[in-house]
């Protein structure tokens, strides 16, 4: 068929090159990270990140203890993961964000292109270094003390946004969606990190979607993490209250953090009542709060699958619930991003709300089958076919 007619998606986010490395507790102490501080995620400035990399080298005797003789590198960030997963599933996908003019920026762009994702950037370049997320993987203090080497692992993260945060609403050009005539992009997905850091840019994107009627442009966003929802709840609510978000994605913790202090609307149909009873009182409360903020709300429930509500006209009259496939979980990194991509791929291809929920759960599970987010296309499609036919 004509690929230009197929729905294309642009994801918007903060591009980060993920650097991960296995370290001992001893190395962490040498870096000044105490036992209590293990497992946290803290933002640091570019010069602090450069220093941390030098200290890591010194602390590990000049030899970085990793399979690849250094850092395991990966093009990361939530929106980039969603774009990679969409391309794997067969949706035309592009990623929009600001990279630095450095080796890591070139690496990020090449890694996404290799996965079939187009890389779009503001015309104004940034002088800051490409964003980094340094992930130090250690055996948790408890398992080290118990002499249990194969025990739980802690991921201590240090993030430097660098160029990824050097972007403003003035940088957005609505013509970007035209894709130079090679098949327009008709859906925009923004990661919650970008919405929280740059609500003005997100408002611009919604404005673009409102003014694009032929073809109609739809939008989605996620709530990123429950810490971020707690810290930026008002920013998120303001972004959503303007209307214009077609699909809102969140997990159970994010939904609870968002709905914490809000009362729900009282009147619901009997059919909705049954569906709400199905998910327990807490999630039910969240759904009834979230329904005010988007046309469709999708809440992932981890091993319990997901639940979604969609409003046709003024009423929320479609409620779907899907189960998660039972699989051996190796690593949950990127599972939420694959879940989002699975839902969007199905929904934009014209599948029902129920089918889209089922596909989201399957894609999310597929991301847990290996360590990291780089699943190959054959493995992914084989897993989808096998799971659908069960």
Image (tube, grey):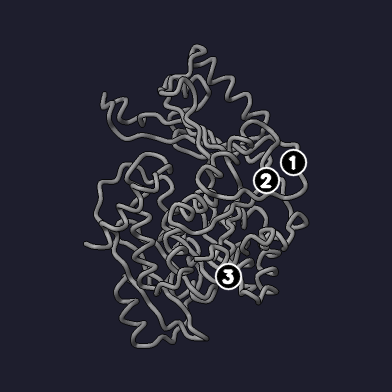
The image quadrant that residue 55 belongs to is top right
Check contact, mark 2 vs mark 1: CB within 8 A: yes
Q: Nearer the viewer, residue 2 or 321?
A: 2
Whole-number angstrom distance, CA of label 2 to CA of label 1:
7 Å
Q: Earlier in the sequence, mark 2 or mark 1?
A: 2
Tell whether label 3 touches label 2 (CB within 8 Å). no
In the image: residue 108, left or right of residue 386: right
**Mark 2 and mark 3: Cα distance apart in space:** 23 Å
Q: The residue tagged with tag 3: helix, strand or loop?
A: strand
Q: Which residue is disc 2 drawn over?
A: 98
- Badge 2 or badge 3: first in the primary sequence: 2
Residue 346 position (above or below residue 51): below
Q: CA distance from mark 1 to mark 3?
A: 29 Å
Q: Secondary structure at mark 1?
A: loop
Say which residue label 1 marks.
126
Q: On screen, 16 above or below 139?
A: below
Q: Residue at x 44, y 87 (%)?
A: 267
The residue that appears at 49% across and 75% down in the rendered structure is 291
Q: Secondary structure at mark 2?
A: loop
Image position of 58 (left or right of 334): right
In the rendering, at what x and y percent does residue 209 appear?
A: 65, 70
Q: Residue furthest left?
A: 390
Residue for badge 3: 218
């Amino acid at each position: 068929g004509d690929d230009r007619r197929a729905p294309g998606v642009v994801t918007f986010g903060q591009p980060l090159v993920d650097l991960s490395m296995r370290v001992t507790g001893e190395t962490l102490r040498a870096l000044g990270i105490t036992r209590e501080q293990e497992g946290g995620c803290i933002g640091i400035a570019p010069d602090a990140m450069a220093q941390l990399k030098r200290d890591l080298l010194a602390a590990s005797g000049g030899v970085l203890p990793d399979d690849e003789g250094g850092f395991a590198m990966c093009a990361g960030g939530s929106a980039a993961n969603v774009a990679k997963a969409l391309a794997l599933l067969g949706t035309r996908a592009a990623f929009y964000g600001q990279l630095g003019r450095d080796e890591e920026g070139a690496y990020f762009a090449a890694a996404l292109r290799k996965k079939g994702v187009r890389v779009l950037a503001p015309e104004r370049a940034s002088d800051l270094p490409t964003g980094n997320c340094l992930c130090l993987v250690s055996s948790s203090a408890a398992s080290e003390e118990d002499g249990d080497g194969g025990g739980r692992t802690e991921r201590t993260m240090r993030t430097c946004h660098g160029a990824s945060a050097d972007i403003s609403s003035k940088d957005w050009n609505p013509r970007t969606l035209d894709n130079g005539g090679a098949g327009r992009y008709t859906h925009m997905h923004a990661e919650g990190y970008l919405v929280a850091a740059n609500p003005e840019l997100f408002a611009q994107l919604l404005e673009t979607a409102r003014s694009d009627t032929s073809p109609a442009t739809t939008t989605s966003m996620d709530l990123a993490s429950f810490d971020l929802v707690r810290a930026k709840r008002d920013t998120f609510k303001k972004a959503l209250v303007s209307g214009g978000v077609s699909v809102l994605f969140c997990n159970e913790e994010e939904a609870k953090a968002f709905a914490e202090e809000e009362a729900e609307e009282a009147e619901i149909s009997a059919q909705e009542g049954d569906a709400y009873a199905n998910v327990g009182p807490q999630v039910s409360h969240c759904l009834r709060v979230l329904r005010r903020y988007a046309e469709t709300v999708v809440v992932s429930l981890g091993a319990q699958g997901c639940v979604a509500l969609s409003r046709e006209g003024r009423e929320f009259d479609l409620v779907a619930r899907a189960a998660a496939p039972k699989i051996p979980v190796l690593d949950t990194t990127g599972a939420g991003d694959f879940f989002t991509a699975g839902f969007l791929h199905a929904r934009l291809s014209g599948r029902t709300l129920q089918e889209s929920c089922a596909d989201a759960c399957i894609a999310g599970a597929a991301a847990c089958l290996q360590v990291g987010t780089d699943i190959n296309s054959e493995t992914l499609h084989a897993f989808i076919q096998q799971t659908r036919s069960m």
